[in-house]
Amino acid sequence: MDLKEIKAVIDLMTKNGLSEFELEKPEFKIRVRRGADGEVSAAPVVYSAPAPAPLPQVSPAAANAVANLAASASAAKDPALKQILSPMVGTFYRSPSPDSSAYVEVGQEVNEDTVVCIIEAMKVMNEIKAEMKGVIVEVLAQSNKPVEFGKPLFAIKPL
């Protein structure tokens, strides 16, 4: 990682209000922190050999994945059903604000341009569209919870 890339990371941290950034690769590790006064410090560490892999631990994301697998199993029973998948990693929201109603409800007919939810990624709200015509059969993600790329969000019966 060269100085230009490190400056780009610092700029992104400043723009997005991040106080810490860490990147670890087999050949190097860098940690950048901003103090309360806004001062940035970077501490690169160079490895001569790859770092050992950490022991597997059960994370909240893994526990969430098991719950999501169980939820999507019911949708998988019917081969006629399709799924709307998450196009990114972020936080799933069913409505535009906490006091608003959900974009879509079970039983609602949608078309390709219907917004079904929002996924927040890096402080940006991304509207997710159905991209197919059909009827929402099941909501597979939980509002205000993280979602992974490719995770099923909704089960839909195509029309």
Image (cartoon, rainbow, N blue to C red):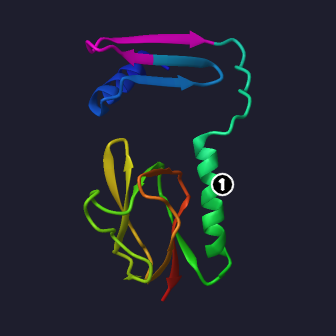
Image position of 75 (left or right of 17): right
**Between residues 18 and 23, which one lies in front from this camera angle?**
18
Q: Amino acid at mark 1?
A: Val
Depicted 91 relative to depicted 68: above or below: above
Depicted 6 relative to depicted 133: above or below: above
Q: Which residues are magenta?
A: 32-46
Taking the magenta stretch, the answer to whether it contains residue 136 is no
Crowding around mark 1 (Cα neighbors within 10 Å: few <14, some 14 to 19, many 20+) is few
Looking at the picture, how far across and down is residue 89, in whole percent? 48, 49
Task: Tell me where residue 99 sits by quadrant.
Answer: bottom left
Depicted 115 relative to depicted 99: above or below: below
Give the number of marks: 1
**Between residues 139 and 131, which one lies in front from this camera angle?**
139
User: At 31% from the left edge and 33% from the top edge, which residue is drawn?
Assistant: 16
Q: Secondary structure at mark 1?
A: helix
**Between residues 49 and 155, which one lies in front from this camera angle?**
155
User: At 31% from the left edge and 52% from the top edge, which residue is drawn?
Assistant: 125
User: At 34% from the left edge and 55% from the top edge, which residue is drawn?
Assistant: 126
Task: Tell me which secondary structure the magenta stretch mostly adopts.
Answer: strand
Looking at the picture, how far across and down is residue 32, in whole percent? 43, 17
Looking at the picture, how far across and down is residue 66, in whole percent? 66, 54
Q: Name the residue beneath numbered marker 1.
A: 66
Image position of 9 (left or right of 1): left
Task: Tell me where residue 94 sits by quadrant.
Answer: bottom left
Looking at the picture, how far across and down is residue 111, in whole percent? 38, 81
Which residue ends up furthest to the bottom in the rendered image? 159
User: At 70% from the left edge and 19% from the top edge, which residue is drawn?
Assistant: 51
Depicted 71 relative to depicted 47: above or below: below
